[in-house]
Image (spheres, coloured by chain):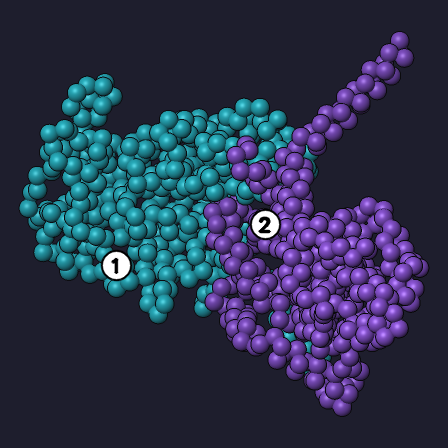
Amino acid sequence: MENTLIRDKLTNILKSIFIAIKRFITSPTLIYTIRRILSGLFTLTLILAVVTALIRLIPDIKLYDVRLYSKLAGTSVTAAENYKIVQLFKYGRVDLDGNRIPVIRNILQYIYNALPIPKSIPIRWDTRYTVVLKYWEGFSYLGTSMDTNKLVNEMLAERIGVSFRISISSVFFAYLIGYPFGIAMAKKPGGIIDRLGTVFIVLNYAIPALVFFLLMNKILGNPSGIFGALNLGYFYIAGDWRSLIAPVFSIVFLSVPGIIIWVRRFMVDQLTSDYVKFARSKGLTENRIMYVHVLRNAFVPLIRNVPAAFIFAIIGSYYVEVIWGIPGTGNLLISAIRATTPDVPVIQGLTLIYSAMSMIAFLLGDIVTVWFDPRIRLTHKGDI
Amino acid sequence: MKNKISEIFRKFLNIFKPTKNKVVRSDDFEQTTYILDDTDKIQNGETIISVKNLEVQFRVRAKVLTAIRKVSVDIKKGETFAVVGESGSGKSVFTKTLVGMLEENGNVSGGQLLYAGVDLAQFVENKDWLKIRGKRISMIFQDPMTSLNPLKRIGFQVAEVIRIHRGLDKKSAKEEAIKLLERVGIKDARLRYRDFPFQYSGGMRQRVVIAIALACKPDILICDEPTTALDVTIQAQILELFKDLKDEFGFTIIFITHDLGVVAEIADRVAVMYAGQILELGTAEDIFYHSQHPYTWALLSSLPQLGRNDEDLFSIAGTPPSLIEDVKGDAFAPRNVHGMEIDYYKDSPLFKISETHYAKTWLLDPRAPKVKRPKIIDEIPERVAAIYTGGDL
């Protein structure tokens, strides 16, 4: 008797778990997400193909050190030829026997290397370039930098941390300041705060970013200037959070107006809508209307951009990283492009990372929007 | 110095405080101690709202627009009082004044608004109004599609009012809300309690809006064109619901509309408004069958329902006057086919026709020439009867 009771209970629980799983698997959001990831991977492949094909346009002679080649040729022609082959092999132009590889295979090779599959790739040879001394063992291989001869994976891992820290803090502060400011402006359109805010926004937009960054670097960093007491310094010092204040402040200052404008716009939209009028006639206090009813509605069109803001802050702070000498990814990209011989693997690796990140950002934006607004369903065209 | 800083800080914090609905008036206003609990003692048929010489003005740029010009009317408990008029006649402003929801540039510039003996026109702060709005006087707006917060569950929105005004806890507020939803005709209210507004149809949403408005058993329900956005069958259902609920809850309805068909369906008394004034006031019968004001005639003549196939549909020529300047004489005079010279320089008083029937036109003055009413007005009883019997006109 009791046994059957327990069994019934168990089957019930199992059933409900089964239903929940079924609902999750068949939920349009999940299907949409999977589709988006698949199409995102396809886009990523295309981007890599284009970048690799473009990089193929760099002549071979730029990819190896001609002086080293002729020096080696002075002692042994084979060694020199081997050196050339090994260098070109690194960029997927020839195989280790010296046969040329077509563009398509070059692209596929790069993608295969980037995929998280265990593999071993030769990375160091003896002085005569005949014997492989060291293999790289691991999952995703993005090549070695031409400049520093370090692995691109490691360089990225090293540098993304500080970029990430800057972007997180600048986006956080930008929203922390921009959001209440936008709300305050929306509460009384045409009021004193609204007007002051508009002046601030217009002036802010009028400043060229680069000029502002250079100015801030000079003003905030100057030890004998007004902010000298804060000891912020002209340059970034690893491990010293204070040296990040100036760059983060500069980014926040320039990104706040964008947030204010949109928050204000959607807030005003919502505050003049009918449901607010009805809520008021229900006898709710203004604060309750504002924070319980309006805020979430005004946030729906904004939330989609929040993940993107984070990601683009990581990508988009080239100026800041160069000016304050921050060893982040932005700085890395600039120096890779600026070098006399472009640092091909670094550019490729950064392109891969950046495109993947922006795709993830937009997908996250969509998912967050769905989570916020029950009216929105993620489906593909034609689905119901 | 310290005080100064805290002053500045407080001012800064005030930025985030709501400013809407705060009517700032120059004359000092002493807090009236008012007892609104007495409203239950008012018997059916006694005056519950008494408007005296009400004047409402809006500041539009540097000019002043007078939207309500000296309106006086008594609204009795338990009746359905309809206010009709064309767009811009001030009917919506009139009702907004009753719940203190005028736009920020508007204010009551004169007169009294007595609700159970309390002068609502003297309310300065929003927190005074919070005791009235939703609790004593509820309001329903035109568009049910947008009256509900799209991101909050239906149940939450109904229970919210019950919790706030009646102080019930979450659980009993929920039970109460479900009862209310069932009462206004939502089937499976318990199952659909957690639905979002977009999952409801237009008619159902209007029912939810009605449920919210009735949640605190208000004395007065103001309906600002509640059926305009609905199709005709749903409109009839909602009007039927209003009648049923009125019998059950015993509230007073103030019904704003420009649809005279709806008025005939539901109203006990009707006020015809034009350019911020009441031109004719009477029972529904007075207005429909014995109307005296040329404007009311014009309105009734332009009803398509009363027209006949062989007649051209009447329309009122011209446009309503701008209320920014002072209106000299009768505002309707330029559009009035029966207009007299006196209309252009002297406003007519409100003539009493019977105990219930008043009209504001010089035509009722003994010295005025006798004017023949339009044929269609004289024929209204027969024509209406023909509509109801389905007969051919």
Circle 1 marks a residue in which chain? B
Relative image position of residue B29 (x, y in whole percent): 49, 63
Relative image position of residue B231 (x, y in whole percent): 37, 31
- Around disc 2, counting alpha carbons within 10 Å, would you say few (fewer than 14), some (14 to 19), or many (20 or more)? some
Q: Colour of chain B?
A: cyan
Circle 2 marks a residue in which chain? A
Check the image and report above or below for A83 versus B188: below
Relative to B243, is A123 on the left or the right? right
Relative to B335, is A197 on the left or the right? right
Q: Colour of chain A?
A: purple
Residue lying at 71% horizontally and 65% vertically, measured from the top left: A60
**Of A74 and B17, which appears nearest the observer?**
A74
The residue identified by callout 2 is: A300
Relative image position of residue B59 (x, y in whole percent): 37, 64
Q: Quadrant of the C terminus of chain B?
A: top left
Relative image position of residue B127 (x, y in whole percent): 56, 54
Q: Quadrant of the N terminus of chain B?
A: bottom right
**Of A116 and B176, which appears nearest the observer?**
A116
**Do the dots labelled 2 and 1 sit on one chain?**
no
Check the image and report above or below for B301 versus A253: above
Q: Are marks 2 and 1 in contact (CB under 8 Å)?
A: no
**Tag 1, which secondary structure?**
loop
- Around disc 1, counting alpha carbons within 10 Å, would you say few (fewer than 14), some (14 to 19), or many (20 or more)? some
Q: Amino acid at mark 2?
A: Val
**Tag 2, which secondary structure?**
helix
Visible in this render: residue B286? yes
Residue lying at 67% horizontally and 60% vertically, measured from the top left: A56
Res B4 quadrant in image: bottom right
Question: Disc number at residue B322?
Answer: 1
- Please, which residue is most extreme toward the top here? A1
Check the image and report above or below for B355 versus B59: above
